[in-house]
Image: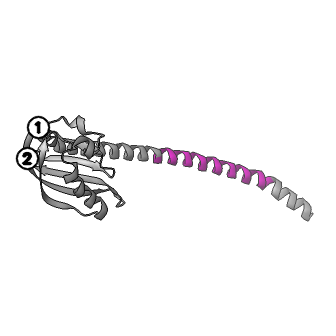
Amino acid sequence: LLADVFFFFFSSVLPAWAGLANQGFALLMVWSVTTLGLRHQTVEQDRRDSERIANERLALLNTIYTSAPVGLCFVDLNLRYLSMNAALAEMHGRAPEYFIGKTIRDANPDLADTIEVYYRRVIESGKPVLDVEIKGTTAARPGERYSWLATYLPVHNPSGELLGVNVAVRD
């Protein structure tokens, strides 16, 4: 008799319980897929927003860089020009594109001995060199000695690694 009751109870309850478990599992799967889909949409929207903000900031910086009345350039740790604005290029009598990818020595052989010292000091110390008077000649005024005031600033990434040197030059 006990075996009959046991068999009757489990034969009637187990399939119902298994059915509920299957339905619960199916609901859990639907919920998981829906949640992941919504999370993916949120991540994608956040990525698009971040990209838009980064592009807006880059456009702003490019506008400031190109329109600044002060000469600006950025040189990497190998003393290679990565950017230069028109104001500084004009001081040297060349287009900005002339300098990009060249080392200081290749682009400015007449000034290299004078200015490389300041770049190296910033790279070695990680500290700025402010308001240095630079005298020399350029392709803009061959044979004529010229004078500028230059500031050399270290540029670090968010983790603190030195990327290179930014220079601001006033005529």
Q: Which residues are magenta?
A: 12-39
* Residue occupying image coordinates x 10% and y 51%: 148
* Proximity of marks 2 and 1: CB atoms separated by less than 8 Å: yes
Would you say residue 171 is visible in this rendering?
no
> What amino acid does circle 1 point to?
Ala
How is the structure coloured here?
one colour
Disc tally is 2
* Residue occupying image coordinates x 27% and y 57%: 120
Q: Which residue is mark 2?
A: 146
Q: Position of residue 57 (x, y in %)?
A: 25, 46
Foreground of the two, 107 or 13: 107
Q: Position of residue 66 (x, y in %)?
A: 17, 40
Query: Does residue 83 appear left or right of residue 145 in this picture?
Result: right
Q: Quadrant of residue 69?
A: top left
Mark 1, Cα crowd under 10 Å, few <14 / some 14-19 / many 20+, is: some
Q: Quadrant of residue 95?
A: top left
Q: Which residue is mark 1?
A: 140
Would you say residue 23 is visible in this rendering?
yes
Mark 2, Cα crowd under 10 Å, few <14 / some 14-19 / many 20+, is: some
